[in-house]
Image (cartoon, rainbow, N blue to C red):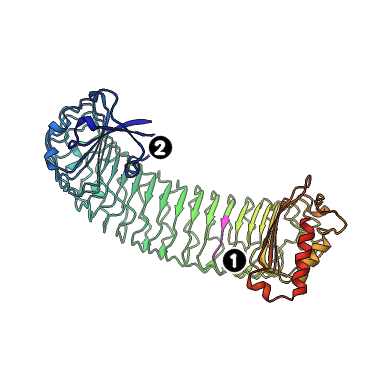
Amino acid sequence: MESWYIYNPLLGVTNIRKIEISADECIENVLQEIEGRISKGCSGSIEEIENLILQSQSESDNHPQTFGPFGKIKQLYLICNWETLGEGLLDGFDDLEGLYVRKNSSLRSIERGFFRNKSNLKKVAINNCKLELEPGMLKGMPNLKELDLSRNQIEELPVGLLTDVPDIETLTLAHNDIRSLSTKVFYGLPLLVNLDLSFNRLQGWNDEAFSYVNMLLHLNISNNAIKELTPASFKRLNSLVTLNLDGNYLESLEKDSFIGLPRLDHLSVNNNKLQEIDTYTFDAIRKLKVLLLENNEISIFGPEVFHNLGKVEFFTCNRNSTPKLELDTFRGFSGVTTLHLTNMNIETLDEDWCSGLYSVTDLDLSQNRLTHLPSYAFRCAKALTKLNLRDNLIETVDTRTFDTVFNLQHLDLSNNKLRQVPSNSYDNLCSVLTLNLAHNLIVSLNPLSLIAFRGLNKLDLSYNQIEIIEPDAFLANHKLVSLSVSFGCVKAATSWIASTNLVDGTKKPGSPIHLPEQLRNLARLDFDSCGMTHVDIDCNQNASSVVKLVDDSKTDAWTTKADDDIAQVKQSITNFIH
């Protein structure tokens, strides 16, 4: 915990208040909810205070004498409405390491000499002001490491402004109104590692702004108005590791766009207007590990666009419009482990469309328009453990679709139009642990329906209209721990209860319930009989089952059923509970 002291010159030093702030807390959030956290006064010497919060609404406090009683301040947080931070205001604060000026909407300028002799100052954050920048205003901080000037309505960065802070490592200029970058505006920052220019109004990119910026690793120019990248746009930034271009107006990526970035391993171009990508665009960034192309207008990928990206591990292309995934589209992605292609209007998968995806373990094709899964659709994805196909229009699955996914553990086919449980030609999907078939059109289960899923732990059949479950339907699924099932009619529900011997009229009330052999490991059963009654059962084979009955008898569903039917299902459930 750090001790901070709140000082208002109007109230005097005798009314200084102490507040404790933990290392993981944001001081701005603490100050917004300060009630109940302030202790009564300062117990030690005022001269020993190191962390000070100054609150002032008076311009008359804007002079060095205001800080006279304090001699060892290391962290200073200003909450004031001063228009200017004047020369000499911080004289005497030779130990100052951090300065924070937040939400001072009146602040317009910082005079030369304000930072005079502040060789220990490491971090300066001035935000939510209307700051006008001038060369020389930062002079006096030769060892500054972090400068945050975000949210200051800055329209221009003057050349020479940053030459007085040559050791700066992190520079944040986000949420301003900067429209362009002058040549050599970042000149003389050889140690700069992180640069954030997001949420500005940049319409173009000037590579000449970065003369002698040799160590930049992370560049964020997202949410600007950049429409195109010229050839070798980033050639001076050859140390760059991450580049964020999200939220611009890029329509294409040319073959020379990323020349000069041999170390780049994270590229994000989400939320642009990309329609095409040149075949050779990514040839210069072969060390790329993460590629994000979400929410663009890409309709087709050329067969060799990704052919040199064997080190990519994570690729997402969600929310584009690519109706067909063709053979060899992703042949170059031999190292990809996570591939997300959701909401892309994909209608067709070519046989072997995933050729080259030898390492993919997590594949997401949800929210598309697939109607059929062809044979060998995932033949090359032999490492696949998680497959998400929910929210498509899938009606049929070829018997050979899943023939080679021997490591598949989680399969989601919910919200489709399946009329039967899919399998493979070997009836062997025993690696699958969870199977989600909710919201389909399945009406019956027989002993062969789930025979391929012998290792299944969790099965979701809710929101189908099941009319019959044959007695041995779960005979191969003795490892089943959780089962959710919905029936289409009262007769189907009561018939299944009776066939599995869940109801035993010979038992006395309160006797332990022993599940049938095929469901002996079941720990949870969600049972919905056509919207009338929902049974949530926490099963324990070593003790009486704990049953939660949610009676929906007041719903409209009850009024459509014959009284005898209602009584029958209620009695069955009541017997089960007892």
- Give left or right: position of 45 versus 464: left
Residue 134 in view in this figure: no
Percent position of residue 15, x then y: 23, 32
State the residue in front, 345 or 461: 461
Q: Residues within 10 Å of mark 1 (few under 14, many from 20)?
A: some
Q: CA distance from mark 2 to mark 1?
A: 50 Å
Q: Residues within 10 Å of mark 2 (few under 14, many from 20)?
A: few
Residue wearing tag 1 = 350
Task: Please tell me whether residue 272 is drawn above or below residue 63 in the rendered image.
Answer: below
Q: Residue 253's quadrant in the figure?
A: bottom left
Say what amino acid the circle numbered 2 marks.
Answer: Asp
Q: Which residues are magenta?
A: 363-367
Q: Residue 36's quadrant in the figure?
A: top left
* Badge 1 element: loop
Residue 421 in view in this figure: yes
State the residue in front, 304 or 89: 89
Task: Please tell me whether residue 389 is drawn above or below residue 159 in the rendered image.
Answer: below
Residue wearing tag 2 = 24
Percent position of residue 336, x then y: 53, 50
Say what amino acid the circle numbered 1 marks.
Answer: Asp
